[in-house]
Amino acid sequence: MTKRVLVVEDNDLNLKLFCDLLKAHGFDAEAVRDAREALPRAHAAQPDLIIMDIHMPHISGLDLIGMIRSDPILRATPIMAVTAYAGKGDEDRIRSAGADAFVSKPITLAQFIERTTSLVHKTEMNAPH
Ligand code: MN
């Protein structure tokens, strides 16, 4: 069964890059450019993984992680944050907000796909369907 990944990223080039990479590796990728649309889109799509930027207008990635983790439908959905590495403190904040994985920009293809694959399989082990 094709795994669905919701990608939340305000930068058009990154959004397209991530979605193209995911599709090339057999994932079903849904692009969300405006963080304010992330929750309704995630409710509709029920993704196996949410990949998100941290620095976004309107709703920061950290706040969005918190919203997802307190949402009764989405709280168990794996989250992978993708952002420029700005020190261990940032990574700690992202992880303690509830992200399962952290990938720093600029991404390497191998790491991006490897983390995505392992997080999607994690969902499968938690809730087989
Ligand atoms: Mn951004």
Image (cartoon, helix red, strand yellow):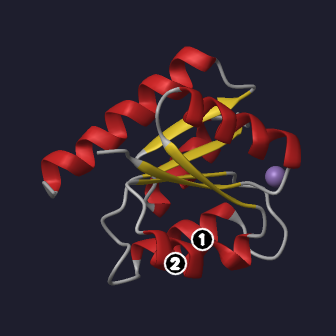
Query: Which residue lies most toward the front here?
Result: 1
Q: From the image, tell me which residue sits under label 1.
A: 64
Vertical placement of 79 versus 70: above or below?
above
Q: Give the image location of residue 105, x and y in percent.
A: 72, 31
Residue 69 relative to residue 128: left or right: right
> As rendered, which of 33 and 63 lies closer to the eye?
33
Residue ID at (54%, 15%): 110
Residue 45 relative to residue 82: left or right: left
Dot 1 beta carbon under 8 Å from ligand 1? no
Q: Quadrant location of the C terminus?
A: bottom left
Residue ID at (72%, 67%): 60
Q: Give the image location of residue 101, x and y in percent.
A: 45, 41
Residue 71 relative to residue 113: left or right: left
Q: Amino acid at mark 2?
A: Met
Q: From the image, tell me which residue sits under label 2.
A: 67
> As rendered, which of 83 and 95 lies closer to the eye?
83
- Total labels: the figure holds 2
Q: Give the image location of residue 17, x and y in percent.
A: 75, 34
Quote the CA–CA distance across marks 1 and 2: 5 Å
Contact, CB < 8 Å: mark 1 with mark 2?
yes
Q: Secondary structure at mark 2?
A: helix
Q: Give the image location of residue 4, x and y in percent.
A: 44, 52
Q: Quadrant location of the N terminus?
A: top left
To which quarter of the image does residue 115 belong?
top left
Q: Amino acid at mark 1?
A: Leu
Residue ID at (34%, 43%): 120
Residue 97's disc number: none
